[in-house]
Image: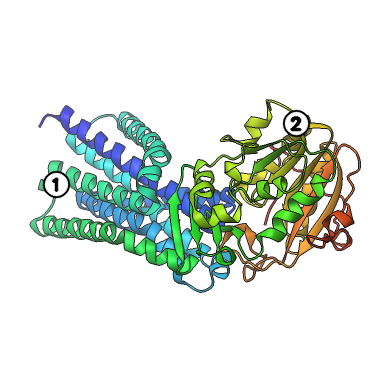
Amino acid sequence: MTPRTGRFLVLAGVFICAACGLVYELELVALASYLIGDSVTQASVVLSVMVFAMGIGSLLAKRLRCRAAAGFGLVESALALVGGLSAMALYAAFAWTGDRGEVWAGGSRYLLVAFSLAIGLLIGAEVPLLMVLIQRIRRQDPSGAVSDLFAADYVGALVGGLAFPFLLLPLLGQLTGALITGAVNALAGGALVFGLFRHDLSVRGRWALLVANVTVLGVLASAAVLVGDFEAAARRAVYGKDVRVAVQTDVQEVVLTGGRLDSLDLYLDGRLRVSGRDEHRYHRALVGPAMNGRRARVLILGGGDGLAAREVLRHSGVRRVDIVELDRGVVELARSDPALSELNEQVYRDPRVRVVHADAFRWLRSPPRTYDVVISDLPDPGITASTKLYSQEFYGLVCRALAAGGRLSVHAGPVAARPRVFWTVEATLRAAGLRTEPYRVGGRLSGFAAGPDRTADGTSAPRDWGFVLAAGSRPVLDPPRTAGLLRVDVASAERTRMRGLTPSTLVHPRYAN
């Protein structure tokens, strides 16, 4: 083999290993965000710990330079094993270790840090060892060798970063994607060492490295075979035994449990969004007060489950309901699932209901018409992905979509459990030029699986819902109008008011858990 070919193969190995390393990082960020919530915090923890560990790994790799080939082979085997199994280990801890909310409220973040640290140490050890190996093929100026290695490393990272969201995640899912990545990592590292540097290994070293690689590949292959059963068992541990539907859409994981209306639960990315036990209280409180007035044209932001639309259509005088929902999978489930479609009273068969699959923020920049009522049925603002939908800029766009005298109803999270978040939503609405009337509804029966929907201590679910009714002029909550449905409590919400809060904007979000 010519030195030119040898250098090309080493750089190809660097490219593949770098792509696998970045997939491990993104996998940890994605899974931690799903299990814990607040993706900004999880991304910061994973990436900062990993970069720090890479530096330590580079220092520790100096001890292996005299046996660079064997060291690199063992490092890649360990990285393939740790990185490939990291997603399953985190999901297993989430599913089976204690209470679903309590575990992920604090202590198990150490597990996330441990995996980030281990993967970072192993990735950091790669480049110093590869520097030694590439120089054995052909001596060259160190700066040139470093440039070549880092160029291959960065291009590989680019490919891995693009492959994760566009290929691995949608086609294979988080668990299988990590296992396949680990197998590719092990094969690439083993092929590089045995193909180019086997003469640098002793006979015992060759056998040891061969056994290590075969063992790693065997473990990963066994895990891949069992991943379906593992995921089903973990899902039952998280959601109970009545899981009927579990699909990964282009946007999120959607899980539907229970077969009867009073036991039906809809989870989106692990967070309970609809419970048949008490959803009528939530949706009537969200929709009812805003429908006091002209209501010919209604816009629902989110609400792909069709339950807010059900409440809207119960009012006379409604001629058109537009639903802006990003996830097609949720809408399709609301149309086709017998229990969920019965719960929403087949609203998608009503000719007045039209669905637009789009991001609400982008769609509001050029709405086709104005609306008498806008219902914001969106996830809690504490979830990072939802923060922009509770910003001053977003409410400014909503104002443009409101007709004269129109009203906006906003789900603003629980009042008692997270008063700062609730009153930040209210302050942000006022900063957008709207007059507000905050209120709450108690009697919540359903709990939450994970993430920011739980209370601060992570041990119990919030027991109320908080809402804000907003309009260009002072909105009025009409007690007689809501008395037959539920008790809308303005006074108790007002008693929790926090003054002097700064509005949340796109460049400076103010919501935190």
The disc placed on residue 345 is none
- Left or right, residue 413 beside residue 213: right
Nearer the observer, 411 or 506 = 411
* Label 2 environment density (alpha carbons within 10 Å; few <14, some 14–19, many ≥20): many
Q: Give left or right: position of 36 versus 51.
A: right
Per the image, the residue denoted by label 1 is 194
The residue at the point 25 percent across, 35 percent down is 12
User: Residue 235, image x and y in percent?
Assistant: 43, 63
The image quadrant of residue 175 is: bottom left
Q: Nearest the camera: 377 or 217? A: 377
Nearest the camera: 308 or 43? 308
From the viewer's perspective, tell me whether residue 88 is left or right of residue 503. left
| Amino acid type, label 1 | Phe
Total tally of numbered discs in the picture: 2
Query: Above or below — where is 30 with respect to 136?
Result: below
In the rendering, at what x and y percent does residue 176 appear?
33, 52
| Mark 2 lies on residue | 401
Amino acid of disc 2: Ala
Residue 339 vertical position relative to residue 370 in the rendered view, above or below: below
Rendered residue at 49%/48% (across/down): 336
Say whether disc 2 or disc 1 marks the residue closer to the N-terminus.
Answer: 1
Tell which of 78 and 332 is nearer to you: 332
| x, y percent for residue 36 | 55, 58
Q: Secondary structure at mark 2?
A: helix
Does residue 55 show up? Answer: no
Mark 2 or 1: in front is 2
Q: How many C-alpha atoms fall within 10 Å of the one at disc 1: few (<14), some, or many (≥20)?
A: some
Horizontal and vertical percent position of residue 3: 15, 30
Query: Of helix, strand and loop, which one carries label 1?
Result: helix
Quarter of the image with the C terminus is bottom right
